[in-house]
Image (cartoon, rainbow, N blue to C red):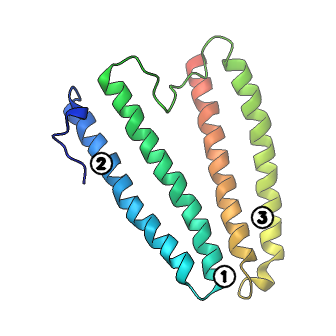
Amino acid sequence: MTDVTNTSTAGFSVWERDLYVHLTSHVDRERGLLEQYKSAAQTSPSKAMRYLVDLLIEDEIRHHKLFNELAQSLKAEAELAGREPMIPYLDFNDPGNGEAVTDLTDQLLKQELEDAQELKRLGRELRDVKDTSLWSILVDLMQRDTEKHIAILRFAKKHTRRSKG
């Protein structure tokens, strides 16, 4: 549990302090879950289960990193120390960025949408082995990742457009 009286949060607003505690507490909880996953991967007699748990471990490591970056960015903001936060500000519309971001987003979004269609086709092709292999769950996970990629790119596009108008 994070100490709310910690002097490292001096100068935080109540909202910032509460959010910081939430983020850092979540990191502590995730650390415990990550250890459980690592233990499961080492002890499971099933190769398939170990493979799937390894995928979960990769996600948990990424989540841990993101929560740490959120907490450190919040801290940099609250301390007004002039440090750049780990998570950058939205700069899509800074001079010279807007058109380049829009063009890049359009290119990447087109590719991701094509990938989504291909993965959908592949998922249909794998229906016959969905109960005998891990292949269908892996394609399903890739479809979800592609949906996430599309959401990220649409976020960038939306926030680039919004500031233009």
Query: Is residue 163 depicted above or below 5 in this figure?
Result: above
Q: Which residue is mark 2?
A: 22
Residue located 24% across and 37% down the image: 17
Q: Nearer the viewer, mark 2 or mark 1?
A: 1
Question: Which badge, 2 or 3, is on the more N-terminal residue?
Answer: 2
Residue position for label 1? 48
Residue for point 73% across, 82% down: 130
Report the side of 52 relative to 60 (left or right). Answer: right
Using the image as rendered, state which of residue 162 and residue 148 is in the foreground: 148
Specify the amino acid type for callout 3: Lys
The image shows residue 136, relative to residue 78, as above or below, that is below
105 to 2, vertically: above or below: above
Position in image of residue 73 (x %, y %): 41, 32
Mark count: 3
Q: CA distance from mark 1 to mark 3?
A: 23 Å
Asked whether disc 1 touches disc 3, contact meaning CB atoms under 8 Å apart, the reply is no
- Kind of residue sitting beneath label 1: Ala
Taking 73 as reference, is 44 left or right? right
Which residue is at a point 55% across and 78% down the rendered structure image?
Answer: 42
Q: Can you see residue 165?
A: no
- Residue 116 drawn at (x, y percent): 76, 56
Distance from the alpha carbon under mark 2 to that under mark 3: 38 Å
| Quadrant in which the N terminus is drawn | bottom left
Callout 2–callout 1 Cβ contact below 8 Å: no
Label 1 sits on a secondary structure element that is helix
Q: Nearer the viewer, residue 43 or 115?
A: 43
Residue labelled with disc 3: 120
Check disc 3 and report its element: helix, strand or loop: helix
Mark 2 or 1 closer to N-term? 2
* Badge 1 density bin: few <14, some 14–19, many ≥20, Cα 10 Å: few
Q: If the image is split into quadrants, where does the C terminus sit?
A: top right
